[in-house]
Amino acid sequence: MGRTPLIVARVAVAETQHRIVVEGRELVLCLRRSARRRSFALQVDHRGPRVAVPLGTSLRQIDRFIHEHGRWLLDRIEARAQLLAQPSFVLEDGVIFPLHGQTARLRVVYPLDARARAAQWRMAADGVEELWLPAAKFSAREFIRALQARALAGYRGRVDEFCARLGRASPTVRLSNARTRWGSCSRASGIRLHWRLIHLAPALIDYVVAHEVAHLVEMNHSPRFWAIVESLYPDWHGARIRLRQAAASLPVIDESCLPPTIRED
């Protein structure tokens, strides 16, 4: 009889704990090595800090990568801690929520016409904008849908504006619910913008829009790309910082709508 050949399967993915001291603070990250990965990545989410690297990457290379992005990592961990310390967002009549950097109010209404089921935006006597939701359709899903509809209409106008400045045709604009990006751009599918940007001040929304529109010219983050961003939005340095800070204060509407880890694309 011939001998049965020994087949050794290569481990495609491996996860271990990785301890490292960053700026005097000891951190424990989940280290994920993957045979399919070709680049390095850092992320902070509900599972904690994570670093992903190609299979076979040395610990020295991993530590160097983490230290190079140490301040970013510590900021994200702190932002996550502040988010978890926030009181839960209770969706009910009269609740206040952020809209374009200002405060808005939710009203659950009982229209005389039972068929009146459309959400409406109105200005209250005290100057606070209100979202009126018919009681028959009151739910977190309908609340989010109303915000998304308003967000998409506004985003399209801003994309048109920045594309006109570059002399480019406006691409298709869609909404995103990604966990790690405020926006993305593809020549095939157009621009996607996170619907939760609607909570933020218009100036911060414009920064994200300018960033993605710039990718219509340069699909990278080269010096030329950032020069285009600066031509569209001169204060992009400050906007990046304010965007990261603002994300920590966004309300958690439900478990599927946690604020994204702050990264552009």
Image (cartoon, rainbow, N blue to C red):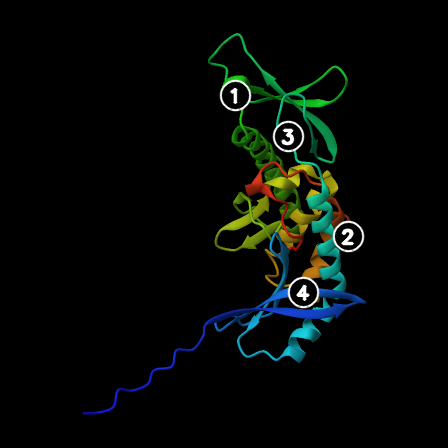
Residue type at numbered disc 3: Val
Left of 33 or right of it: where is 126? Answer: right
Q: In this view, does 257 lie above or below 265?
A: above
Q: How far apart are marks 2 and 1 (CA)?
A: 37 Å
- Assess disc 1: are there few (<14), some (14-19) or many (≥20) residues with their C-alpha within 10 Å of its C-alpha: few
Element under disc 3 = loop
- Assess disc 2: are there few (<14), some (14-19) or many (≥20) residues with their C-alpha within 10 Å of its C-alpha: few
Left of 72 or right of it: where is 110? Answer: left
Frontmost residue, 252 versus 144: 252
Element under disc 2 = helix
Q: Residue furthest left?
A: 1
Frontmost residue, 104 versus 230: 104
Of badges 2 and 4, the one in the foreground is 4
Q: In the rendered image, which residue does mark 2 sit on?
A: 241
- Say which mark, if any, is on residue 28: 4
Of badges 2 and 3, the one in the foreground is 3
